[in-house]
Structure formats: structure tokens, C-alpha cells
Amino acid sequence: MLDEPMPGTRDTPAGPVDPLAPTAIELEEWVPSRLQGSRTLRRALGLLAAAAIWEIASLIINDPVILPSIQTTVSALIKYMHVPYPSEAVPLWDHALVSLGRILAGFVIGTVAGVAIGAAMASVKILKDLIDPIIEVTRPLPPLAFIPLFIVWFGIGETSKILLIMIGVIPIMAVATVSALDTVPTEFIDAGRVLGASRSYTLLHVRVRAALPGIVTGMRIAMGVSWTSIVAVEMIAATSGVGYVILQAGSYLVTSLVFSGIIIISALGLLLDSLLRLLLRRLGPAV
Amino acid sequence: MPAPAPEYVSGQYDVQLSDVTKVFVRRGRKPLTAVSSVSLSVADGEFVCLIGPSGCGKSTLLSLIAGLAAPTSGSISFRGAQVSDTDPQRGMLFQSPALFPWLTVYENVMFGPKAQGKKDGGVAERARDLLAKVGLTDFADAYPKELSGGMRHRAAFARALINQPAVLLLDEPFAALDAITRMSMQQLLLDIWAEFSMSIVFVTHDVGEATLLGDRVVLMSARPGRIHSVLENPIGRAERRDVDSPEMSALRRKLRADLADAISTGGQGERDA
């Protein structure tokens, strides 16, 4: 709470005001000009600080099995990009591509299916009443709970991995699509109609178009869930993929490779999310 | 400033409503009669204001004329033909400008022609002219979120006018604007009306606005929404603009009294839908 009356508010009772005390307005101007610099710079500083803590901690612990230094991790990352790991398998680079392929397959199929289900729910009331409880029941379940079931049903092949991603993506996309379509203001649709657009033109160019940013935002959330699912399933039932590498390297105490795997997931996740953010920006303002 | 009044041929109607009733069926509740046996004719080039307490069905009536909804009984015709769907000839402006946020101002204006597949060279030029008319030439490539409230309404005007409508329906379009912006928007509307020779049906709950703009003020009472009385504006179009004249003050006083009567005679038992 401020002890002194807020300057700038008109109904402040007149009273003694210290002319030297900083006013709220002055503070507002003062703070940004001090710290403005560049937002990118501040964000980079945050990352650098985290890296510094990592490096210092590894120096103090001085045991690469518990915490390898940044240099050790980076050299492991570079080495295993062409050296197969485990020795009978493929290099890290190929593991990354395998994981990426599974993600994309599950994510794309799941998104298409989820959007279709959501669109059907938003247009047919009966379907919404039928499907809504199914989604409500399955949505809180972590997809990982389905791993043993899928292994029993489909074995440890690619099918169970792609299905596992889909089971996470579909409810998220269905819910995001329904809510995006349902929150399009009626006035937009009416405006489209009175401006001379047919019902189908209005549906496509107004309602669906207005819902796109909400749908892409749903895709960003679904992408995060996909990574959780794929890494988990690769740790349990796989002979390739980044999750598999992380688990193997952990078992053999090659901690620097565990960190390398984590860095790869982080980089790929960032890459895919920035593609979706780019798509969102291409869609233009949403409000 | 006083624009010449558009040609007004009496006996020629743009919009005719006869015995129009609209009932909304609500799940688990009593059906709501929003509009009850309303008959009204809007002459070519006429400016009609609909005024009344909230819940009197003014907006419902407007959406029926627009063709966004169908009456439960009665009929609505536009230039002799039955209204069964929306028609770019009947433009409408809403309480919010309802500009599409993902389109620039220019693209918003071009929405109608594009949706109708009209791609003749004149349209783009007309869009530029309209943007100039509403003072948005410099904002043609801006997105709606970058505009002020008044500018958004002006863009919405341009977007509706590109279709060259014969009738313009306005649903309390200036209600959310500040007094000064509202005055300039009313002025703009009068200028546009004079230039484009349209009929206008204007919903408002502002007595001053109704007396300034309307050739005729139709007063509605609520629940069910029906016409309470019709006031022919005795003051000429040019003279009305002097809103502080004794005649205008007297007219406002009369309309306010009528409005009070309309409110007291309307049933008030039912909650707003």
C-alpha cells in the first residue's frame, strides 16, 4: 500500500505532499528507462545465469557422473552425433530424427482428428452432448497411463507410440476447437451475412477464420504434451529415439549423454513451438 | 454543412412490415414474445428512429428486417418482395463495429464485394473513395485494433456502404461512444444519408438522437414489444440540427413524456431474455 496519496487521481483530498517524493508517474518512467536495454538482452542474461550456475555447481561437485560440466556435455553431444549409441544402434542425430518423426506423425494425425471432432461438436448439438462426457472423462488421464495397454494391444512397434501421442493430442485439439468456434462473436457472423456473404462463405471466411488463432494456440499446448508422451514411451518400450538414449545413458552412468539428450529435446521442442508461433503471427491480430 | 435532403417519393415503400410477431421458444421457460403484431412502413429515403425501453424488441425487429431471423407470423417485404434471407441491399450496423480483426481496414471494406464475387475494377476504387469519405485513407492498411472507437465505427460505415444498400439498419451503433465522438458520427450519418439516398431504420434509446435524426420516431413499449405511438417529426431536416432551439427542446420533452407512458403501460413482470 502507498502511504502518500496517489498523484494524478483527481479525487485525492488536498493535503501536504512532499514535492521531492517520487510520484507514481515518475517511477513508471524511471524504472523502464533504467532496465529497458533490450528485452532480448535480458532474456539472454537469464539463460547465461542458469548456465553459470550449472558450470559452478559442476566445478564444486567435481564428479561428471553426478553433474558433468557444460564442456563435457557439449563434447558428448558432438561426439555422439556421429558415433552410434548404444554401440549396436544409431548416432544421436538419427535418434532425434526418429523421435521427431513419431511426434510429427502422432501430432498431425491427432490434430486433424481433434479439429474434426471439435468442429463436429460445435456444429451438431447432439454430437456435443455425446462426445463431451467422453472427453471430460479421458482428458484428466495422463496419456502415459495407456502405455501398458497399448503395448498389450499393439506391441512395441511404431503404432503404439503414434497412438499414445494421438491420445494426448485429440482431446486437447477437440476442446480447443469447440471453444474457439463457440466464442466467435455472433455479431461477426451476422456482419458477414448482412454484407452479402452466403452461409457457407460466412462459415469458412468468418467463423472458421476467427477460430484459427484459438486452434493454433491449442496446437502449441498439444505439442508440449506430445513430447512428454514420446519421451516416456521411448523410455519404456523402444530401441531408438531420444528417450531411449537418455534411459540407456542413465543406466550406464553416461550422464553427459543424458544431458545431451535433454538438450536435443529442448532444441527440437523450441523449434516446433517457434514454427507454430510463426503460424500464429501469420494469422494476424485475433482481437 | 446542411446537406440537401434526399428525394422522397411518398407512397413508395422500401420496407413494409405487416402484423409481424416474433416469439422465441426457450428451453424450460415460457416462450418470449419479443415483437407483437407490429406493422410499419418505411418510405424510400425516409429516416425512421425506433425508440423504447430495453427489452421492447427494437433490435429483434431490426434483425427481422435484415433477414437474419424470420418472423413467427406476419410478413416483411423489401421493395415488394418477401424477405426470406439477408440481402446486401439491406445493410446493417451493429452495436459494436464488428470489424474482422484479422483483416485490415481496406480488406474489411472489401469483404462484401469479395464474398459476392464482385471483382470489377470499380469496387477497389469505390472502397478507396469510401475510406476517404469516412476519413480513414491513412488507416487503410491498419488493423481494427489499431483504431479508436470512433474510427472503427467509421470503418464499419464504409464496409456497409460499399454494397450501396437501399436500406441501412442501425442497431444503437453510437451507444458506446463518448458524447463528442457520437456527435461527429451522427453528422457523418446525416451526410452519408443525404449523399446515398437510402432509407434508414435507426434503433436508439436516446431521445435527443431520435429527435435529431428521425423523420419519424416510432415509440415501442416492452413485453411484448409493440408500437406504442408514432411521432412525425414536425421540424425540417435542416432546422433539427439546431438542437438547442425551443422547438427541439419541446419535441424532446414530448417524446420523453410519451416514453414514460410507454414504459408504464408495458408489462414489467417478465425478466429480460
Image (cartoon, rainbow, N blue to C red):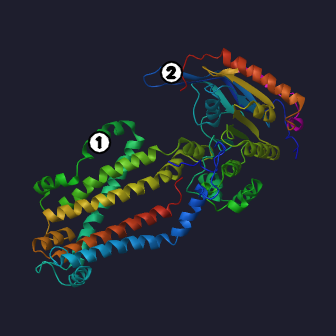
Rendered location of residue B211, percent (x, y): 80, 31
Tell which subunit mark 2 falls on. B
Q: Residues within 10 Å of mark 2 (few under 14, many from 20)?
A: few
Q: Nearer the viewer, mark 2 or mark 1?
A: 1
Residue sitting nearer the eye, A18 or A247: A18
The residue wearing badge 1 is A136
Q: Is residue B122 visible?
A: no
Residue at 27%, 76% in the rendered image = A56
The residue wearing badge 2 is B31
Please determine if labels 2 and 1 lie on a single subunit.
no
Rendered location of residue B166, percent (x, y): 73, 42
Residue A203 among magenta residues: no
Which amino acid type is shown beneath numbered disc 2?
A: Pro
Q: Is residue B86 visible?
A: yes
Quarter holding residue A80: bottom left
Magenta residue span? B228-240
Above or below, B186 relative to A80 = above
Rendered location of residue B49, percent (x, y): 74, 32
Residue sitting nearer the eye, A5 or B187: A5
